[in-house]
Amino acid sequence: MGAYQYLLDWHLKWYIDNHPDASEPSAGAEPTSPLVKGGLKGGLGSPDNIVGDTDASSTPSPDTENEPSAGATPTSPLESREAGRARGEHKGGSNSPNNTGVEPPDGEPQESPRLDAKNLERRADPAPRRTSSLARSSGPQGGKRKTTPDPFLKARGGVPAIFQSPAGGWRLTTAERKRILLANIYGVDIDAQAVEVTKLSLLLKVLEGESDESLQQQTRLKMERALPDLAGNIKCGNSLIGSDFYEGQMELLDDETMYRVNAFDWDEAFPQVFPPLSRVKRDGQGGTKGGISSGFDAVIGNPPYVRQEMLGEYKDYFKTHYQTYAGTADLYTYFIERGVALLKQGGRFGYIVANKWMRANYGKALRAWMKTQAIEEITDFGDLPVFIGATTYPCILVISKDEPQETFTATTVDTLDFTDLCEHVSGISFTMKREGLDDGGWALVDSKQQDLLLKLRAKGIPLGDYVEGKIYRGVLTGLNKAFVIDNATKDKLVDIDPKSADILKPFLAGRDIKRYEPLVTDKWLIFTRRGIDINAYPAIKEYLEQFKTKLTPKPKGWKGEKWPGRKPGSYKWYEIQDSIDYWREFEKPKIMLPDITLRGNFTYDPGNHFYSVNTTYIISTSDLDLLGLLNSNLIDFFYRNITSSYRGGYLRYIFQYMVTIPIVDTANALTTLVERMLDLHKRLAEAHTSHDKKLLQQQIALTDREIDRLVYDLYELTDEEIRIVEKG
């Protein structure tokens, strides 16, 4: 089952659970939902705008059930695993819809699946650009009515909703499919071509499995066109921006800008969803007036991934219209807020989006807003390749338009090796407390882990405060090829001019920094910091001259072709790009670490004046107990649970998260053990025989475990909490 399928089934199950009259079986029949059984194939697709779909209904024929509709986009591994078998089964628990179709016994009246107007559930998906998604969303559900095994006999007084196909089994009539489509599915996309392709895909779905003979057989009962007009359902526009974008600047906007912005007003475009009596000023919240509920029952989709650099002309509008605004936020941030705003009271929202909002700085406003919403479920896929050919770090987010609850369901998926996503999620999901969500970044962990993280925060003080803010980035040169040299070049420059040695610094890359290991490098940094007199170092100046074109900063207001040099700035061509005002901290005792690593790799420089690349950090301190804490299992556990992992299980140490690591007063309890670890690693680097190396590695492992044991004691962990850390 694909991620889109999962969203659709989730919303379908919710609707059935909350509208018992829409799926109640006849006496003696098992509960069934043809939509759950096989009508949904892949779920709603990528929204550049938002699509509303209500209770869709069509039962695919057995021979077409597994075929993608026209315009289908590449599927994810979650979807491709489902090929060749029935999809859409929603298992696991007594509340799940039964997946067995009910065949009517001969001669007995049965309940045929029909969606009556009173049971409509309008769904919205931002942008039907992945056109197959809307076509896949059709399947019967809803109210019921009596029919006989031979619908055509029953139809003497009207048009039937189902008929028996020549191959046996019951199928929705084309007229019923048309009715369901027009009453239930709505879409908006900023791309006019995508809108037309979507309409075609949906129309093909109406005709799926039909032949000329079957169409004639059905339409003879009522003279009408075979295909519906979808102009009122699928529209072109910018689902995030209303016509108020133009206020006060109509005379300043040319036709091209108007066409590009393509403002869209939901209330006016879909009066059947936002009826006039219910219209109120939509300030990000759905409204009701006169007892009529306004909005969609469900909003489902996969917003586009558009980086903030591409949003320049819209940022002022987003800033004044969206509570979730952040200057560096990706576009999907606003799709989330808009999607929830389009819901009616009690409606449900489900998106597939990047998981970066949970921890990124730009997600702070979104997280604060979301804590005021009724979160139902968050399913995080981490770095799994859910979408073939794209690294998206996706998650599934489900929110309801209700009062916020104290808890919600969370899941962290760590494998794609399963046959049914619903079943897999059901087996590994856990409950999270809303109050335990940290404003600095959200971690999806169960309640026990959540309580432990809160305890650790309470026990210590943030690392940033502990070291008085002395955490610094490595050096950003702007062109390492020019400023980073090898031993031979360094020796040559010193031979030409011995004074060159004054600004040549031993230089470390991230890969040179390893846990407790001594620092060794064969690279040197030409450290021409801001304000240096380059003429005092003639050999260095002559060497850098060969890179002058690539080193020259881009002039302000440059309008020519692509600039061959470095970014604009108030630095000379021969100077390091960034000011590095804290450069003296590199020449003091310090803890060093790479920013990308499989686990915490902290080591110590006692004062050998090592400088490092900008993909590293230094912590200006000689506190060896701090080094032991940072390298411990407990702190590694803490950091893993407050930040994201990357492809291959890598962690990235980021300043905003590092400064929150809780540090306790150790009273020098770890100093001796940490000194031993540093010495053992130094001896290991110098060992020659395999026997000596093995003995040293055994001592290192024993000392490491002893440090971990003392750290657990310092943070006053219980045996159960230790097991949580060790398991993690």
Image: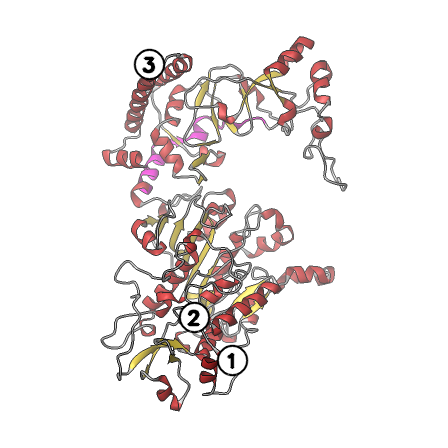
Residue hosting label 2 = 56
Between the C-alphas of marks 3 and 1, the distance is: 83 Å
Residue 49 forms part of the magenta stretch: no
Residue hosting label 1 = 226
Looking at the image, is mark 3 or mark 2 earlier in the sequence? 2
Q: In the rendered image of this protein, does residue 211 appear above or below residue 52? A: below
What's the residue type where badge 1 is placed? Ala
Instruction: Please state the extent of the stretch shown in magenta in the rendering.
Output: 450-475
Looking at the image, is mark 1 or mark 2 earlier in the sequence? 2
Looking at the image, is mark 3 or mark 1 earlier in the sequence? 1
Q: In the rendered image of this protein, does residue 98 appear above or below residue 511? A: below
Residue closest to the far right: 560
Question: Of tags 3 and 2, which is closer to the observer?
Answer: 3
Count of numbered circles on the image: 3
Crowd tier of the residue under label 1, counting other residues whose Cα lies within 10 Å: few below 14, some 14–19, many 20 or above: some
Residue 153 visible in the shown view: yes
Between the C-alphas of marks 1 and 2, the distance is: 18 Å
Residue hosting label 3 = 691
What's the residue type where badge 3 is placed? His
Give yes or no for contact between labels 3 and 2 (Cβ–Cβ under 8 Å): no
